[in-house]
Image (cartoon, rainbow, N blue to C red):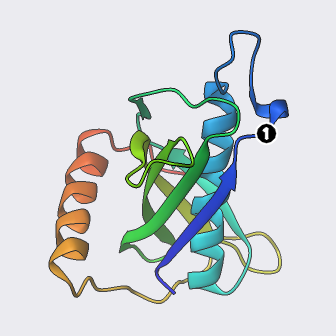
Amino acid sequence: MSSTTLRFLVEASAVGPGGDVHGGTVMKWIDDAARACATTWSHGRCRTVYVSSIRFQRTLKLGDMVEVRARLAFTGETNMNIGVEVRGGDLTDTRPEKVAECLVVVIALDAEGRPMLVNSWTPETPGEMALASSARAQFESTRPAPLE
């Protein structure tokens, strides 16, 4: 499976004193969805090693429906580059609005916790190809330092 979608309602524990969901909570949801996608693809343990700039575009409130979609954008030898988009809004909205988006890089781990090879993934649809192209460009422009 090359994508994972998490759906849930915003609970009181995610909301701050101002009535909005904490940015850190949205970041946790992003990490959860990316790791679920990567774990499903690699069939094993994974670890997030990099998250690109997260762009927050709107806030979420108590009771909003949230959808966090993580999709493989491209794979490396041991890493999976995953585009994550968070959408949300009132339960009665037929088209939830974009809340945040980013690129997450996750590595697969063997039983000893060392990086292990993953199956390569090739985009097939126009949407997958567009995501792969956009994610590669974003990754290259903000490339993290090599892991040691």
Q: Is residue 46 above or below residue 91?
A: below
Q: Is 58 left, or right, of 126 in this rendering? A: right
Q: Is residue 31 visible?
A: yes
Neighbor class of circle 1 (other Cα within 10 Å; few <14, some 14-19, many 20+) is few
Q: Position of residue 120 (x, y in %)?
A: 40, 87
Q: Residue furthest top?
A: 18
User: Type of residue at label 1?
Assistant: Glu
Q: Total marks drawn? A: 1
Residue at 63% in and 29% down? 61
In this picture, residue 86 sits left or right of residue 23: left
Residue 144 visible in image: no
Residue 84 lies, with reference to residue 109, above or below; the image says above
User: Foreground residue, 22 or 102?
Assistant: 22
What residue lies at 51% left-to-right and 87% top-to-bottom? 1
In the image, residue 113 sits, relative to residue 44, either above or below, namely above
Q: Position of residue 138 (x, y in %)?
A: 26, 47
Left or right relative to 101: residue 116: right
The x, y position of residue 126, in whole percent, is 15, 77
Residue 134 x, y percent position in the rendering:
20, 56
Q: Nearer the viewer, residue 22 or 48?
A: 22
Q: Secondary structure at mark 1?
A: loop
In the image, is residue 123 above or below residue 70? below
Give me the residue at 54% from left, 55% from top: 67
> Which residue is disc 1 drawn over?
11
Q: Residue at x 82, y 31 (%)?
A: 12
